[in-house]
């Protein structure tokens, strides 16, 4: 059996709140996800704000540790990696953050952000070799090295900073890029360019991409597989086209119905998200979407819905998913 490059198994993450840390917020609840070594895939993690998308991305990057469950890199628990293996992880798995400004030191020119990984990860023997590699990576994302690398972060636009992060990832030649809302801070004219840039990295360099987004339209355009998160749980997953064209979970249908359309006589208050009830959360153990579901049943507040296996590798966490066989084992689908 092939060992995934990255794997999350039964992971949960709770953040303590309050002065004494007695209260806690659950960001993720029993989530599993695998990114295979080959073939490379584009996996979209979609959901509204607060659904746990960024926490899941930070677990994959090794920035956060799970409260329960395990995160593995090439079959090894990330909490027990040797120094050399952790260095390899940093090269194999690269981030692109939502706000690239936070990744830059304002006291250094942006070329410094590129030079450090080139030298510390052993990509180049000398600074001259590293400078040549950096210039090539910057050109591949549509920027001019002579105009960009000598500037400070605040002198660049958000789109330029974001593309520099793509160039930094390309420079390292990773196996996986974890892109957390990479186009949320750029205008529409640049959004398509950056999405095509990610797809080109995938096609030309064989890089898998975990694309974190709240926008199902871009997820549909770029992804092979879509994972829908709500309240820290995976509620639906499957191929992008099948999931968007025939959604099986009420929340997925809600997200799709809420995509803006050009209807001049339609008011915002008429959109599905605006009409959703905002009731109290269900009792512990029930469906966490019950308070907002228009098809809620009494059992939804009492029992946790199972993860149901459908045809063609699709999985749905809902009592309405039909009489399909229940998932026999967590590892069999790669996502839970």
Image: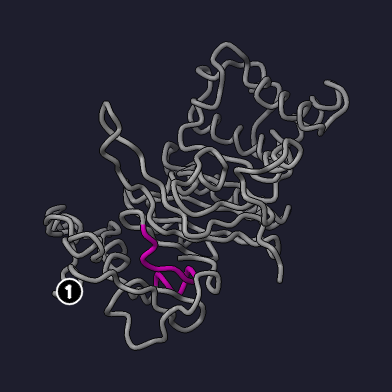
Q: Is residue 128 above or below residue 216?
A: above
Residue 293, placed above or below residue 110: below
Asked whether, in this view, residue 157 is left or right of residue 110, the answer is left
For mark 1, what is the residue? Answer: 295
Magenta stretch, residue numbers = 233-244
Scheme of colours in the image:
one colour
- Residue 288, horizontal then vertical, whole percent: 25, 61
Q: Which of the pair 132/285 is nearer the observer?
A: 285
Which quarter of the rendered picture does the C terminus lie within? bottom left
Mark 1, other Cα within 10 Å: few <14 / some 14–19 / many ≥20 = few
Q: Residue at x 71, y 67 (%)?
A: 2
Left or right: 301 in relation to 317: left
Which of the two residues, 334 or 126, is positioned nearer the viewer here?
Answer: 334
Q: What residue is rendered at 69% in x and 39% in y?
A: 86
The residue at 37%/77% (across/down) is: 246
Seen in the picture, residue 296 relative to 281 is either above or below; the reply is: below
Q: Give the vertical position of 63 relative to 117 (above or below).
A: below
**Residue 49: x and y, percent?**
32, 46
**Picture coordinates of residue 329, whole percent (x, y):** 50, 75
The part of the image, by quadrant, that contains residue 123 is: top right
Nearer-the-camera pick, 228 or 6: 6
Task: Using residue 252 as the reference point, say whether residue 205 is left or right of it.
Answer: right
> Is residue 137 on the magenta stretch?
no
Q: Secondary structure at mark 1?
A: loop
């Amino acid at each position: 059996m092939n060992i995934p490059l990255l794997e999350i198994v039964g992971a949960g993450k709770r953040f303590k709140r309050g002065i004494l840390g007695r209260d806690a917020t659950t960001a993720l609840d029993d989530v599993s996800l695998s990114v295979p070594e080959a073939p490379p895939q584009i996996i979209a993690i979609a959901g509204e704000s607060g659904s746990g998308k960024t926490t899941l991305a930070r677990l994959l990057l090794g920035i956060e540790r799970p409260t329960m469950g395990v995160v593995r890199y090439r079959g090894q628990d990330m909490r027990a990696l040797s120094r050399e293996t952790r260095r390899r992880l940093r090269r194999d798995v690269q981030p692109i953050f939502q706000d690239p400004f936070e990744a830059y030191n304002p006291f250094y020119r942006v070329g410094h952000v590129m030079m450090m990984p080139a030298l510390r990860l052993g990509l180049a023997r000398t600074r001259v070799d590293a400078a040549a590699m950096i210039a090539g990576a910057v050109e591949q994302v549509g920027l001019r090295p002579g105009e960009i690398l000598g500037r400070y972060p605040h002198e660049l636009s958000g789109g330029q900073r974001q593309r520099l992060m793509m160039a930094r990832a390309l420079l390292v030649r990773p196996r996986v890029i974890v892109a957390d809302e990479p186009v949320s801070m750029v205008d529409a004219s640049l959004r398509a360019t950056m999405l095509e840039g990610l797809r080109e990295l995938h096609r030309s360099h064989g890089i898998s991409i975990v694309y974190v987004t709240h926008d199902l339209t871009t997820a549909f355009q770029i992804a092979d597989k879509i994972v829908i998160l709500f309240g820290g749980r995976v509620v639906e997953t499957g191929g992008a086209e099948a999931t968007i064209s025939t959604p099986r979970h009420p929340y997925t249908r809600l997200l799709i119905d809420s995509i803006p359309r050009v209807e001049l006589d339609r008011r915002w208050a008429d959109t599905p998200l605006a009409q959703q009830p905002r009731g109290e959360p269900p009792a512990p153990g029930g469906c966490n979407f019950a308070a907002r579901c228009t098809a809620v049943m009494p059992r939804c507040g009492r029992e946790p819905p199972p993860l149901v296996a459908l045809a063609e590798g699709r999985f749905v966490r809902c009592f309405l998913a039909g009489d399909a066989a229940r998932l026999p084992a967590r590892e069999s689908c790669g996502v839970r």
